[in-house]
Image (cartoon, rainbow, N blue to C red):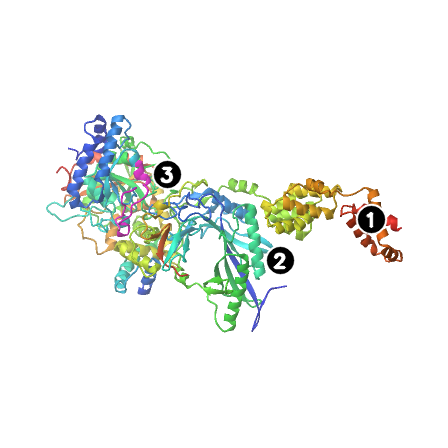
Amino acid sequence: MSLDPATVRRIARLARIRVEDAAVPRLQGELNNILGWIEQLSEVDVEGVAPLTGGAQIALRMRGDAVTDGGYPERILANAPDRAGEFFAVPKVVE
Amino acid sequence: MTYTLEGSTGSWEVVVGLEVHAQVISQSKLFSGAATDFGSTPNTQVSFVDAAFPGMLPVLNEECVAQAVRTGLGIGAHINLMSRFDRKNYFYADLPSGYQISQFEHPIVGAGAIEIELADGSTKKIGVTRLHLEQDAGKSLHDQHSTKSYIDLNRCGVALMEIVSEPDMRSPEEAGAYLRKLRTVLRYLGTCDGNMEEGSMRADVNVSVRKHGEPFRTRCEVKNVNSIRFVQQAVEAEAKRQIEVWEGGGTVLQETRLYDPSRGETRSMRSKEDAHDYRYFPDPDLLPLVLDEAWVESLRAELPELPDAKRARFMREYGIPFYDSGVLVAEQVIADFYESVATGRDGKMAANWVIGDFFAGLNRTGHSIENSPVSAAALGRLLDLMADSTINGRIAKDVLEAMMDTGEDPASIIDARGLRQVTDTGAIDQAVDAVLAANPDKLAEYKAGKEKLFGFFVGQVMKAMAGKGNPALVNEALKNKLG
Amino acid sequence: MFSDLSIVEAASALRRRDFSARELTQAHVDAVAALNPRLNAFITETPELALARADAADAALAAGTAGPLAGIPLAIKDLFCTEGVRTTAASRILGNFIPPYESTVTANLLRDGAVFLGKANLDEFAMGSSNMTSAFGPVANPWQRAGSNAVLVPGGSSGGSAAAVAARIAMGATGTDTGGSIRQPAAFCGIAGIKPTYGRCSRWGIVAFASSLDQAGAFARTVGDCAVLLGSMAGFDAKDSTSVERPVPDYLAATKRGVRGLRIGVPREYRMEGMNPDVERLWQSGLQWLRDAGAEIVDVSLPHTKYGLATYYIVAPAEASSNLARYDGVRFGVRQDGVDLIDLYERTRAEGFGDEVKRRIMIGTYVLSAGYYDAYYLRAQKVRALILKDFSEAFARVDALLTPTAPTGAFAQGEKMDDPIAMYLNDVFTVPASMAGVPGMSVPAGLDHQGLPLGLQVIGRPFDEETVFAVSQVIEDAAGFSAVPQVRAGA
C-alpha cells in the first residue's frame, strides 16, 4: 500500500494539518518510507489471535454518580486564545 | 390501510428508521464529575476533562451504565455483559477532544423491540437494532456575533443513549407512534425525561422510498429533528423529494440533510460532508466494560411496571376498554393518578371521570396533572359521594368544577352549597304534583299516548328541585302519578 | 560538595541537619543557572519556587513532619502538568499553556516534600529518541566522546531529565516512557531509569502521547534513588481508569534482596546480527555478574521481538493522532487565525506542531482510516497480543530478563536525522516491554570504546518492580560504574 499525493492531502485534511502543495512530495516520500517498513507485519501469522486493545489487563472501574467537578468557568476559560465573556469564541461556523 | 405516496410513475412506499439520542438522567456526566443541569450559566458545568485539557482522563459513571441497562431491559433487549468504548474522531468547535467517546463495535445493549399502536387500533412491532452510550457535544451559538461562533461546553460530556431502530416504519404516523412510545417507556423507566424542546431527546431520521416489492433504495439521514411533529413532516417532505429525484431520472445520494420546518423541506448539510472518516478505534484510556450478571438481574428486579404490562393489567383488573387504558398509561403520573382513584371503586367509572371531566377541568383551569388542584384522593371521595347517593352524577360534575376552582374537598362544597341529593319522597311527590299541574296540555298529550314526554317531566321535576332530586326516586314518583 | 550525593544520602544528611534544604537547593539552582545554557536541559526554570519549597522543607524537617523527599531538588519532564507553571510538552502549540492543575505524579512528589527546579526538555510530545524534535531546541548530552567535542544527544524523549541528572544539576527527575523514553536516555547519559508496569503510576495530568503505552517513571544516579522516587510517584489513582489498585511496596528494601536463586532469562532474539561489540561484551558481563551473585541464567525466546517496533509505530501514532486532536487553538495553546474554523485548525496545527509530530499524526490518521484499519491497526493489536504472550510465556520460566538497553551509545546531534526509521531503531530493545506493559529499568554498566556510557535493561513481570530493583542493584554493585560526564556540576 503506497500513498499517492491525493491521499497525502486527504490524510492531512482529516488530521486538520495544513500542507502546502510544495511539501506534498517530501511528505509522501517520508510517509511511504515508514509505511513500507511497517508492512513487515503482514508476514506475522495472526490467525485466531484476539487483538490486545489496551495497556492494562483489568476490567473497567466505575465511579459513583455525584457532582464532584466543574463550577470553575474562569479556570476553564483562562487559557483561551479568544473568548467572549463566558464563552469560547471561534470564527463563525456556517452549518 | 398502507401508507403510500403517489408519484407520476405510480405509488411509492416510504421506509423509515430512527436514531434517537436520549439524554440520560444522571447527576453528573458520563466521564466526568461535572453537573448535568439544563440551562446553567455557560461553561459553569465544565471540568477540565470535559474541556479536554492536556492529561485529563475519563472515568465512567456507573449510574449512566445502569440507566442504559434499565432502558435495554425495558425494551426487552439483550444486555451485552462485555462492551467497549471507542473514539469517534472528528474536529468540531463544540467537541473539545476532537473525538467523541461512543460505542461502535460492541454496544452495551443489543436487539430489542418496541410495540406501537396506530390510529386504527392495530399494533406493530418496531425492531430496535442496538442501544449504546456516548457523550453529548457542547453547544455552538451562531447568532451572538456577526463573525464569531460562541462555544458553551455545559452539555459537553453528558451521557446520551443512542437508540437505533430497524428500518421497520412505513409512514410518518408510524414514526410518530414509535417516538411517542419510546418516550413513554423512557419516562416510565426514569432514564430520560424525553423533553424534545430542551433537546434531551433528538431524532435522526433515515428515510428512503421504494416501489412495492423492491429491495431498499438509498437512504438519506435527516439530522437532529427536535419534535415528533417535525419528524413526521420531515419523513413526508424527504420522501416526496426522493420520489421527485427518482422520477426525474436522477439518483438519490446518501447524505446528511437538515429539516427546515418553516419551509417544510429538507436541505443538504454540505459542511459535514468531508467529516466522513471517523477512524473509530477502542479508547485506550478506558478498558472493556464488563457487567456482572447479578447486577443486571438486580436492575431487572427493580424495573417499574412498563406501559404495555400496565395497560393489560388495567384492562384485566378494572375492566376498562382498550382505548381508555391506552390514554391512562400514556404517562406514568396519569396511570398512578387513575389507579389511586380506581382502587376500591368502580374502575370503569373512575376511568370515565379521569379521562372525561377531570382532564377537561385541568384543561379549563390550565393545570397539569402534577399540580392539579384536585388530588386523586379528593376525586375518589367525590366518586364515593355519588356511590352512596349523597349526590347524583349531574351535581357531581358541578362539584368537580368547584373543586378545580377552589381546591376544596367535595363534601364541604356539597354542604356549603346545599347540593345534597333529595331522597325525601314527600318533597319529590310535591315537586311532581307541581310540575303536572303546571303543564296540563303536556299531561294530556302523554295520556293520549305520547310516552316520549316522560323525559320532559323528569327534566322539569329535576329543574324544580335544582338538580338535587334522586333520579331513581323521581322516576318512580312520576311513574306512579302518570299511572 | 553536593554533586556526588545520592538522594538516599542527602535525605539522611538533611535529617541530621548536616546542611539545610535551602543550601542543597541553592547549589542546584546555581548549577542549573551555570550549565543549562550549555545543556538546554530545562525549558522552564523555577528557582524562586524551588527555594520557597526548600524553605518549607527546612521548616518541616525542623518540625519533624518532613516527607521522605523533603528538600530533594528534582527536574520534572515538561510533559507533567504543573499547576501555575508553564507546561509545553516541548511544543510551540502549548508554548503559553499554564495548567490550572497538578498531575497526580508530581502532586505525590510534592506531598513527600520534593523541590522542583523546573521543567525539563524533551522531544516534542515525547515523540523522539534524541531530544532533537523539541521546539525549544535540542538538549546536549553531558557526555562527550573521548577526543571529540562533538555535541551528542542525550537520547529521548526524556532527554532533558536524563541530562540534568547526569550533569548533577538535579538529583533525580521524572520521565515518561512510551517506547523507551526513560530507559534509552538513561543509558545514553549513564544514569539509572525505571519505567514501571503500565498502570503503576497515574497518567492523570501527563500530556498524553500514546495512552495504552505511556507510563511515568524515574531517573536518578543510583538504583536505590530510583526506588525511592518511584515509591513516591506510584500508587492508585481513581482519576485514571487504567491505574491499578494495589499497594506500593517498599522498593528501596527490594534493592537489597539480591538475586540468589533467581532465574534470569536471556532472550535470544535480542542478539541481533551486526550487534555493536561493546554492547554485546557488556551484556555478557552483566550475565556473569548475575551468575556470580547466585542467579541462574536461562535462555528464553521472545519470538515476536523483531515485530515490536513496527507494531509500536502503528499503535503509538494511531493513539497520538487522536490524543493530539485537542490541540486546536480553541481553549488553550497558541492559535493561528484563519478565514474560517477549519482554516484556523489547519494553520494552528501546521504551525504549532513540528515535523516529527505531524508525521506521526498523519501515519496514525492513515492507519485508522476507512479501508486500512484492519490491515494496519487491527493487525498491530493482534501482534501486540502475541508480544504480550511471548513475555507471559518467558515469565513462566524466569523471574526477570536481562538485555541491552539500546543498540549503541549516544550519537551526535544531527546524526540519523534524515531517516526516521534509523532513529526509530534506537528503541528496538525497549519497545517490546512497552508493548507488553511490563516494567523495565536501565542501569549504567560500563563504557563503550569511545568512552560513552552503555546501559543494561532489566525487565520484570507485571507489577514486580521489586525483582527489577533487586536485579538492577546487583548489576550496579558489580559494575561499579564511577565514570562521570565531562559536563557536570562541581567539575
Structural distance between the alpha carbons of marks 2 and 1: 44 Å
Q: Would you name the residue on which mark 2 appears?
A: B118
Residue at x 17% of width, y 48% of height: C152
Residue type at mark 2 is Leu
Which residue is the extreme one toward the front?
B438
Structural distance between the alpha carbons of marks 3 and 1: 83 Å
Residue type at mark 3 is Asp
Given residues B367 and C440, the one toward you in this image is: B367
Name the disc covering residue B475, or none.
Answer: 1
Local SS, label 3: loop
Left or right of residue B306, residue B478 in this image:
right
Residue type at mark 1 is Asn
Local SS, label 2: loop
Q: Earlier in the sequence, mark 2 or mark 1?
A: 2
Mark 2 residue crowding within 10 angstroms, few (<14) / some (14–19) / many (20+)? few
Q: Position of residue C146 (x, y in %)?
A: 12, 45
Q: Chain of mark 1?
A: B
Structural distance between the alpha carbons of marks 3 and 2: 53 Å
Q: Would you name the residue on which mark 3 appears?
A: C237
For the C terminus of chain A, the quadrant is: bottom left
Q: Position of residue A22 (x, y in %)?
A: 25, 64
Mark 3 or 2, which is nearer the eye?
A: 2
Which residue is the extreme one toward the left?
C147
Do discs 3 and 2 belong to a common subunit?
no
